[in-house]
Image (cartoon, grey):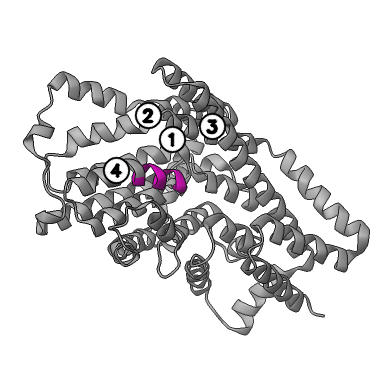
Amino acid sequence: MSYELIAILMFSTMMVMLATGQRVFGAIGFVAVVAALLLWGDRGGYDLGFAAAMKLMKWYPLLTLPMFIFMGYVLSESKIADDLYRMFHVWTGGMAGGLAMGTIGLMVLVSAMNGLSVAGMAIGATIALPELLKRNYDKRMVTGVIQAGSSLGILVPPSVVLVLYAMIARQPVGQLWLAGVFPGLMMAGLFVFYIWLRCRITPTLGPVLPKAERDVARAEKYRLLRAGLLPLFIFAVMIIPFVNGWTSLVESSAIGALAAFLAAVVRRRMTRQVFENSLRNTLRISCMFMWIILAALAFGAVFDGLGAVRAIENLFTERMGLSPWTILILMQLSFILMGTFLDDTAMLVIVAPLYVPLVDALGFNLIWYGVLYTITTQIAYMTPPFGYNLFLMRAMAPPEVTLGDIYRSIIPFVGVMIVALSLVISFPEIALWLPGYVYAN
């Protein structure tokens, strides 16, 4: 049996297992170990899983994962996000669509707190959505705002997904995070511009808040500003020492976790329940990601041993005569297709053993490609008919927001994200300038 046929058989077996509802790490790890046993016997098969586990345990930057997840859950469970929304409510409610624009700002700060899009979706749906609907904002627009804003969680640092990509692609986590800063802020800015333009054309979509709600004493407005910007201060305390080279990435993650804990204590919101919930969720998410990384490493080792990446590269470039850019675009389209039934983590671990070495062989920058992958999975998350975020939104939205409303709400925001993706593809320096500048100094 040829190596190409073995590779196809591995992928098809894995997809069948996923279609039957098996857990991602179980399907990928099972296929990897069984393939290794059949190809190289008992010794090779057992050694594969053991070597992947040892590589995972020795990867020092992985310690950042539980630190950042703990930081995010502490800030979320202690309701500091509520202060953020109250701040945007007061400061942006005086313009048409202001509260929707403030929601995007909320999502950016929540992303800097947590690094997971699901957290942004939960906070947006429970805090922002009821307030927006109560103030007669168009239900289709606001559901699109929350879905689009929550997707920033996997791009704006500290993105947990970029940590996973760094592990699989063997790239520095710090450079990937810095590479996500400008594309993430650019995308948020494009969302805000779209909301502003749309509400300027049709003011009824995002009415100005009543004067009574906006008539807050100046002292109270500044108090809310200080309270709302606390997560941003925590992020600065964590990231500035790292950018200046005073601390390592792991040390910065510990500073961020400690700062979030102390902030909750100072605000008198660190109850026993908040602490327990934060620890339980941190353990659950961290273990899930570690199992997925372990399975992906084992799967990638089989592909390296087969030489499948080289065979597929020859198929695309020599037999089919495709250019590197055509191959890259086809890769991004495949992510959008897979996003109809898989989440971003599953997509990455399924295709990374194939795509990452292929991207490297084609001469593209792997840091830049990590940003492209992340933006594309953001788009895939929200692409009908089965985008992951669409059903999360439906589960959290009130009954008057139908699935049809959710489908239609996301169309303009997907268009905005495609514009952002095109800009990053056309101008790689949007992603690469900041990590290049910081690491050069």
Q: For this view, does 106 lie left or right of residue 362?
A: left
Nearest to N terminus: mark 2 or mark 4: 2
Q: Are marks 2 and 3 in contact (CB under 8 Å)?
A: no
Q: Which residues are magenta?
A: 117-125
Residue labelled with disc 1: 113
Quadrant of res 220:
top left
Residue at figure coordinates x 52%, y 22% from the top left = 272
Q: Is residue 88 magenta?
A: no
Q: CA distance from mark 3 to mark 4?
A: 22 Å
Main secondary structure of the magenta stretch: helix
Which residue is identified by label 4? 128
Image quadrant where residue 319 sits: bottom right
Residue that label 2 marks: 80
The image shows residue 182, relative to residue 247, as above or below, that is below
Q: Position of residue 89 (x, y in %)?
A: 21, 36
Q: In screen coordinates, is 325 left or right of 43?
A: left
Viewer-side residue, 234 vs 286: 286
Say which label, 1 or 4, has the lower sequence index. Answer: 1
